[in-house]
Amino acid sequence: MRTPLFLLSLLSCLTVAAQTAPFAPDLGIVAPEDAGIVVYDIAAKKEAFAHNRDKEFPYASNVKLITTGAALKHLGRNYTFKTRFYYKPETATLYMKTQGDPTMVMEELWLVANELKNRGVKYIARVVADDYAYGEKGSIPMAGSDGTGRAYNAYLSPFALNYNSVELVFLPGKEGEKAQVFISTPGRHFILEGEVMTVKGKEKKVEILSENTDGRTKLTVSGTIGTELKEGLRKERKIWDPLRHYTDLLMYFMFQAKDVVPDRARLDDSLFDAADGIRYTHESRELFLILTYMNRWSTNFIADAIMYAIGIEKKKDHRAGLAVLKQYAKELTGVEPNIINACGLGTVAQNLLTPGFIIDLMKKEYGNPFAMPDYFATLPVAGEEGTMKKIKADYKHEARFKTGSLSFVTAVSGLMRAKSGRVYLVTLVLNSKKKAYLVPDRDLVLDQIWQAF
């Protein structure tokens, strides 16, 4: 039987109505006024959905989207952080200078020590370091620091090592016995005191007090750990004297039995070009790889160090980096962002951005054929990498997102290929006063966006 024409027309209208029905996401526990969302259709060049587009929210680590673009523009994808060494044989003095390398870890420092030995450095009586790139004190607190010894409060410094933090590993023994405690960084810099006892079950009530003791880092441990924690417990604490920490481990890798306390001095670059000594310049990996790591794991330490590098390279002053970031964003969006740093760390009253600003920023980067591939390639793939690795929703493998989180705040921004196959720029921020951990609510909304578009 043939379907009447009027019925076909009615079915067609219903189909169109179903396709164009307004998107009304379930926000979970979050009130509508505490959510911001913009979905931008790249092919259609228009916003497919917007909610609280121009309302300011604390965007946490989504601030790193600004840092990423500014770094690629002002430093270039192949920029490297350089650390220069010069050894004067007559006095057995090692001179060191850097404008900062936030990616220096102990494995890289071992390579530095090995290279110095291969070039003929056999004994070091004195170390002179120029660590003035970040100011007179040589190190500065991270933004939002609460003064404790926790790793997120680590100092920012030119001579940084292991993000100026140290990892401790606790392994349970038999019930009633002391747990094993390992410090991940070798050498003589650390003083370890106290004990952790093994108890039955899955207990992990371990406390670590980190203190400065004459330039060395004293770690006092206490508490209990359960027998069922077979893989142990890992915790990180800050380093109190970054230059001393760096020097101590370098001397350890040089097989020197005696500690060498570094002297600080302003050193002219010409010293490191002198022909009467041993010279070596260590270079970090390229900036594109550093930005990828920064965004993949949302590393605050690297973000602020990149901001300082931009200030030094463009204005000869690390403090100018923040202004350069703001100017970069203003040139792209017409709006100067309300940010206090490059990493997004701070209180819920700081680093305030609007969903519209984030979308406009990403639109400009997506529309730049030269910058676009590098910019979005630094963002982690959902279900595969970094802070997005645990995603198991339907949009797994179909999105590249920069995440951000603070207590009572979660944000995510980037590219998504929706269920329809169309590609969208997406930004989402939730700011709840009721719930501190909002990742499940974030994922609920993201899955709805993927399904609807």
Image (cartoon, rainbow, N blue to C red):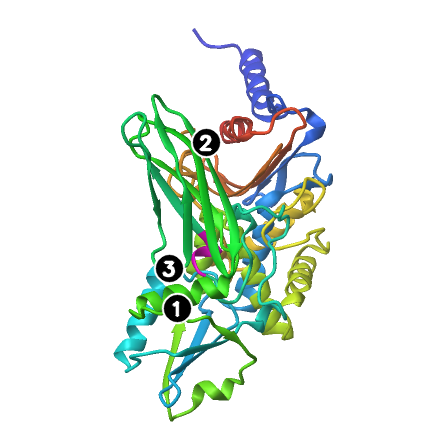
Residue ID at (51%, 84%): 269
Start and end of the magenta stretch? Answer: 161-165
Q: In the rendered image, which residue does mark 1 sit on?
A: 259
Q: Main secondary structure of the magenta part?
A: helix
Q: In the rendered image, which residue does mark 2 sit on?
A: 419
> Which comes before the other along the chain, label 2 or label 1?
1
Label 2, residues with CA under 10 Å away: few <14, some 14-19, many ≥20: some
Residue 188 got which mark? 3
Q: Amino acid at mark 3?
A: Arg
Q: Amino acid at mark 2?
A: Lys
Between the C-alphas of marks 1 and 3, the distance is 8 Å
Where 267 sits versus 98, above or below? Answer: below
Label 3, residues with CA under 10 Å away: few <14, some 14-19, many ≥20: some
Q: Nearer the viewer, residue 345 or 156?
A: 156
Q: Nearer the viewer, mark 2 or mark 3?
A: 3
Where 269 sits versus 62, above or below? Answer: below
Q: Secondary structure at mark 1?
A: loop
Q: Amino acid at mark 1?
A: Asp
Circles 1 and 3, Cβ within 8 Å, touching? The answer is yes
Q: Nearer the viewer, residue 9 or 252?
A: 252
